[in-house]
Amino acid sequence: MYTEISAVEMVEVSPRDGLQNEKRAISTAYKLELINRALESGARRIEVTSFVNPKAVPQMADADEVCAGLPERDDVTYIGLVMNQRGADRAIATGRIDQLGAVAVSTDGLGIANQGQTSEESVEVAKSLIRSAQAAGLTGQATIAASFGCPFDGEVAVDRVVEMAAQIAAANPVEIALADTIGVGNPAHVASLVSKVKAAIGELPVRVHFHNTRGTGLANVWAAILAGATTVDASIGGLGGCPFAPGAAGNVATEDVVYMLERAGISTGLDLDKLIEMNRWLGGVMEKDLPAMVGKAGGFPQPDAKQNDERNVA
C-alpha cells in the first residue's frame, strides 16, 4: 500500500468533456441522470456543462436547461466551463453554477482554433473570467490547455507553461490545472512540469487533466500526484475529447483512476462498484462499449466463499 499521500480529490468531467465531442445527441434528461449517478457514486465536484456557442459545440446547447435541473446540494461544487465574458454571464445568470472554469491555451495555434484567442490573449481573458466569478460570489479556476504538446504548433516549452501559470495565479483562482489536451504527455514530463508549476504558484493547488490517447494516462496521473498535484479530472468510461484539437480522444477513465488510487491506499471518496454500474448504464445510453478498462474487467476479484469452504473441507 502507498501511504505517503492519503487522499486525492476527483473532478467528474463526463457531463461536459466526456460528451462534448460525441456525435450522438444526448438528451438533457440523460445528462441530468449522469450527474445524479455521479453524485450517488460520491462525486462532489462535477463539470456539468459549458457555456459556449451551440453552433460550435452542439452537444452543449442545453447548458441552461441542464443547470435548471441540477439537484440542490450544499456539499457539491458545480463547475461551468466558460471561454469568454458572454459565457461567464450566462453561467452566473443560471444561479446554479458554483465555479467558473476558464481556459488559457499554451499555443497560438490551438488558442485560435479553440477560442479565437492567441495564447497571451487567452491568459488575460482567463484572469478576467476568474475575477468575474469572484465578483459574482463564485469561485474561479483556470486550465492551461495543451500543456504537454499542441496538435498545431507541436512541442510546448515547459517555461512557457510555468510563466502562464504564474500570470494566472495573480488573479487568485482556487487552483490551476495542467491539461494534456491531445494525450502526448509522459510521466517524466508530467513530473517535471507539475513540480515547476507548483514552485511558481506557491500555495495554489495544481489539478491535472489527462487524455489516454496513447495509453499513458494512468501513468501520468500517478506521476502528477507524486509530484504534488492534489486534484485529478476524469470521465466515467473514458469518454472525452476536444472538438478543436485533432486526435484528442479519451479522458482518463474515472473508474480506472479510482481503482489504481484506492488499491494504493489513496482515498478518492468514490464508490468503485457504483462507478462500474455507471459505466454500463452510460454505455447503453451511448450504444457502444466504453474504453475504460476497469469498466470491462471489474474491480479486484473477490474469492467465492462457497468455493473456499469446499477447498477447506477437501
Image (spheres, rainbow, N blue to C red):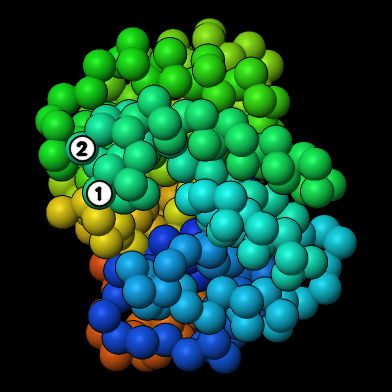
Q: Amino acid at mark 2?
A: Gly
The relative height of residue 81 versus residue 64 in the rendered view (above or below) is: above
Residue 256 appears left or right of 6:
left
Mark 1 falls on what kind of element?
helix
Residue at 55 percent of width and 24 percent of height: 168
Q: Position of residue 8 (x, y in %)?
A: 60, 39
Quadrant into which the C terminus falls: bottom left
The relative height of residue 182 versus residue 219 in the rendered view (above or below) is: below
Q: Position of residue 233 (x, y in %)?
A: 49, 48
Residue at 47 percent of width and 16 percent of height: 197
Residue at 64 percent of width and 18 percent of height: 170
Q: Is residue 296 visible?
A: no
Q: Position of residue 9 (x, y in %)?
A: 62, 43
Q: Are marks 1 and 2 in contact (CB under 8 Å)?
A: yes
Mark 2 falls on what kind of element?
helix
- Nearest the viewer among 223 and 13 is 13
Residue 294 appears left or right of 47:
left
Numbered disc total: 2
Q: Is residue 92 visible?
A: yes
Q: What residue sits right under mark 1 in the picture?
A: 113
Q: Residues within 10 Å of mark 1 (few under 14, many from 20)?
A: some
Residue at 47 percent of width and 78 percent of height: 61
Q: Residues within 10 Å of mark 2 (few under 14, many from 20)?
A: some
- Nearest the viewer among 152 and 298 is 152
Q: What residue sits right under mark 2 in the picture?
A: 109
